[in-house]
Amino acid sequence: MTSASNQDSTPRTLLDKLWERHVVVPESAHEPAVLAIDLHLVHEVTSPAAFSRLRQRGAKVRRPDRTIATLDHSTPTTPVAKSSHGEFVNVFPVIEDADAARQVDTLRHNCKEFGIRLLDFDSQQRGIVHVIGPELGLSQPGMTVVCGDSHTSTHGAFGSLAFGIGTTEVSHVLATQCLLQRKPKSYAADFSGQLSPGVSAKDLMLFFISQIGIDGATRHAIEYRGPAITAFGMEDRMTICNMSIEAGARAGMIAPDETTFAYVKGRPHAPSGAFWDSAVTNWKRLTSDPDVTFDRSAQFDASQIAPMITWGTNPAMAMPAGGRVPQPQDDSWRRALEYMGFTAGQRISDHHVDVVFLGSCTNGRLSDLQAAAQVIEGRRLANDVRMLVVPGSQEVKLQAESRGLDRIFKSAGAEWREPGCSMCIAMNGDRVQAGQLAVSTSNRNFEGRQGRGSRTLLASPITAAAAAVTGRVIDPRDLAVDGVASVAV
């Protein structure tokens, strides 16, 4: 392990600093490091076997106070009952899929047996795991955060080291609050300039992934830097770090700053009083040193990025929303075109959109719904377009309803749903039918991701909203809003 004096004098990346703070046993040529874990998030899909292993070994959960569980993947999003005054009523939905119902019941039983707090259907704090962690102030700078879900990288937006783990690792963390892990390499992604109006964090990430590929950051932790990044609010930063895994990265992170501190302050699990002041002093040290060298680096001009749309079957197959489908580069591109039903050189706008999905841990937060509502307001969905709007959490839902966003969506003909992963994963009753073309604000467009035979185009909330009201993919800046041919984010 590096000595304290060397640590003080050697320039270090944000990754270095986070890693050094959490190493219990250093890595060797033959063994991974033992890494301490600050926060463990649990949901119903990847945890049943992990709890079974604890039971088989007679083990307990070492730190239930650092573990929190929620229901999100297998949960129906169909509307629940309301009182005569419109308040939320704690009604447990009927889960028609037997496997999904079993997963939910199993998590309830496991959390009760092992003393873990569960945000069940009767909790006003329930929601998608990567939405509620930040909302509740559980995700904080300087932490290590893990979950049995690949998009745990979301929490890196706070200047934490956050990554997904497998079921065996979930069991290990439950039992020990530690994890065997090899340190990833460092990758600096610098974005100069500023995004144009109508271009979002989701567009930036689809552009980035299209440039480096789905394996472009394999075995690396990406640190996003530059004026285009620091200009984002926290919800946009979460979108950026969420999509890191789609570039093959182990994690994504953004150094904490005043924007971060303002977001965390006052949340239920945030430090307060003198503890807050001490925490901020500590968090301000979590930046890469000015003269540090990264293992890899890349530079991009954010002002050159346009609204993006995917055309193929992985997130790197992306292009400007107003462009033409590219010529195939290899067999995988040819297979993707065949599956999607597209022809090289044509505009995707030639195809009718059947479904629009607004939601997920990538784009299911309040600012995402607000951006889409700005496009939708005063318009109707195009003929034969179905739109699902699924808030990322109960808090997002209530905030959106207090602002009248639900009325905007419902007046346009969209379905206003309960929180959950919904069409992102298609294991909860919300599916795109075979052959249908969906524009989705989620993070993956693999074959059948949103339902067997479904075809998915990934987009930002405003591009998705523009597709909902026109019935086709367009550059949202071409859709006049109040007479102005541009859409602000």
Image (tube, helix red, strand yellow):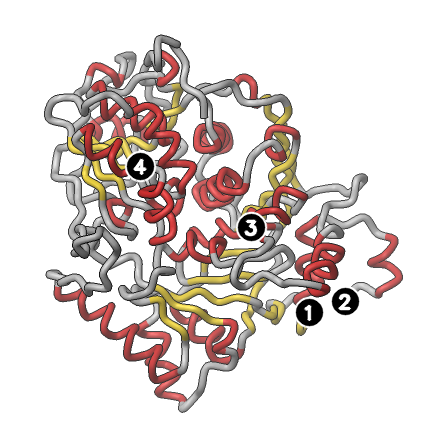
Q: In whole angstroms, how far apart are the C-alphas of marks 2 and 1?
A: 6 Å
Name the amino acid type tagged 3: Gly
Q: Are marks 2 and 1 in contact (CB under 8 Å)?
A: yes
Q: Residues within 10 Å of mark 1 (few under 14, many from 20)?
A: some
Q: Is residue 269 left or right of residue 126?
A: right
231 in relation to 38, above or below: above
Pointer 3 residue: 156
Quarter of the picture containing the N terminus is bottom right
**Front of the two marks 2 and 4:** 4
The residue indicated by pointer 4 is 404
Return the disc, 4 or 3, that comes first in the chain's sequence: 3
Which amino acid is tagged 4?
Gly
- Where residue 153 appears, x then y in whole percent? 49, 51
Name the N-terminal-most of marks 1 and 3.
Answer: 1
Residue at (14, 32) in percent of width and height:
436
Residue 260 vs 339, above or below: the answer is below
**Looking at the image, is mark 2 or mark 3 earlier in the sequence?**
2
* Element under disc 4: loop
Residue 26 is tagged as 1
Q: Residues within 10 Å of mark 3 (few under 14, many from 20)?
A: many
Question: Which of labels 4 and 3 is toward the front?
Answer: 4
Mark 2 Cα-neighbour bin, 10 Å: few <14, some 14–19, many ≥20: few
